[in-house]
Image (cartoon, helix red, strand yellow):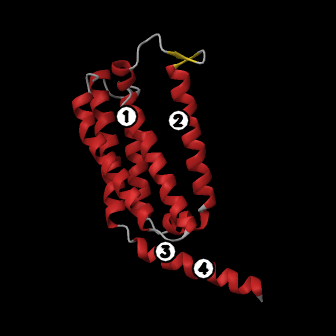
Amino acid sequence: MSSDGIIEVPGIILLIVCLLRSSQYFMKSHVKQIKAFWLGAVLIFVSVIRRELNYLPDLLVPSDFLMLGQSYDWWEDSVLTLIYLVALGLLVYSRHYLWAVLKNVPVSLYLSVTVLAIIQYMGENAIMFPHTFGEIVEELAETAIYGIALTYLWRFKLADYESCLVQKLNYKFNHANN
């Protein structure tokens, strides 16, 4: 585990709980677009967790690993890129549901996450923070962002958005048949 590994643990735990909550919404959903949205969220959390556990390959994969002539890093980047593209495709497919969710998020939440992301970037790149303190700032900002995500997911009412989307889809279907 890296030197700041202990401070990463709460963030990883929050991400795993976010992943589980998104999986729960995926299982509860009955509309294809909503299932696609939550599957996209699950894939995003999987990729973020993998990035947070960046020290695992060093522990588990030999440095001279090759498969079909490519290194572990190449395979990891390829698989993560594929996951990102599938998640993006699922979110595009569920764009009406995505928009319904995003437009109901308070602006203050967007601003808070943006400020934390800027602080995280500044800490990671030692901008206005000494390098050792910057790592701590980076991890604390990330943990705060993950905490906000979990709080939002926990308070999210799937039934409210599901009924809204079903009504919208029924409206479009009825008007398309007329």
> Residue 116, relative to residue 8: is it above or below?
below
Image coords of residue 113 (percent x, y): 40, 50
Q: Residue 86 carries which label?
A: none
* SS at badge 4: helix
Q: Residues within 10 Å of mark 2 (few under 14, many from 20)?
A: some
Q: Residue 138: where, in percent of width, then height?
A: 33, 34
CA gap, disc 1 and disc 2: 13 Å
49 lies left or right of 35: left
Q: Mark 4 points at which residue?
A: 168
Give the amino acid at mark 4: Lys
* Gap between marks 2 and 3 measured at Cα: 29 Å
Circles 3, 1 touching at the beta carbon (< 8 Å): no
Q: Percent from the top left, x then y, of residue 149? A: 36, 54
- Crowdedness near tag 4: few (<14), some (14–19) or many (≥20) residues, C-alpha within 10 Å: some
Tell me the tag on residue 80. 2
Query: Which residue sits furthest bottom?
Result: 178
Q: How crowded is mark 1: few (under 14 residues within 10 Å), some or many (20 or more)?
A: some
Please say if the residues under marks 1 and 2 sit with CB atoms less than 8 Å apart: no
Q: Residue 52 carries which label?
A: 1
State the separation of the CA atoms marked 2 and 4. 34 Å
Find disc 3 in the rendering and name its residue.
162
| Disc 3/disc 1 C-alpha distance (Å) | 32 Å
Q: How crowded is mark 3: few (under 14 residues within 10 Å), some or many (20 or more)?
A: some
Quadrant of image for the C terminus: bottom right
**Residue type, numbered disc 2:** Leu
> In which quarter of the view is residue 126 placed?
top left
From what the image shows, is residue 99 above or below residue 115?
A: below
Tell me which numbered mark, 2 or 4, is placed earlier along the sequence: 2
Mark toward the start of the polypeptide (4 vs 1):
1
Residue shown at the point (49%, 55%) measured from the top left: 39
Q: Is residue 10 above or below residue 100?
A: above
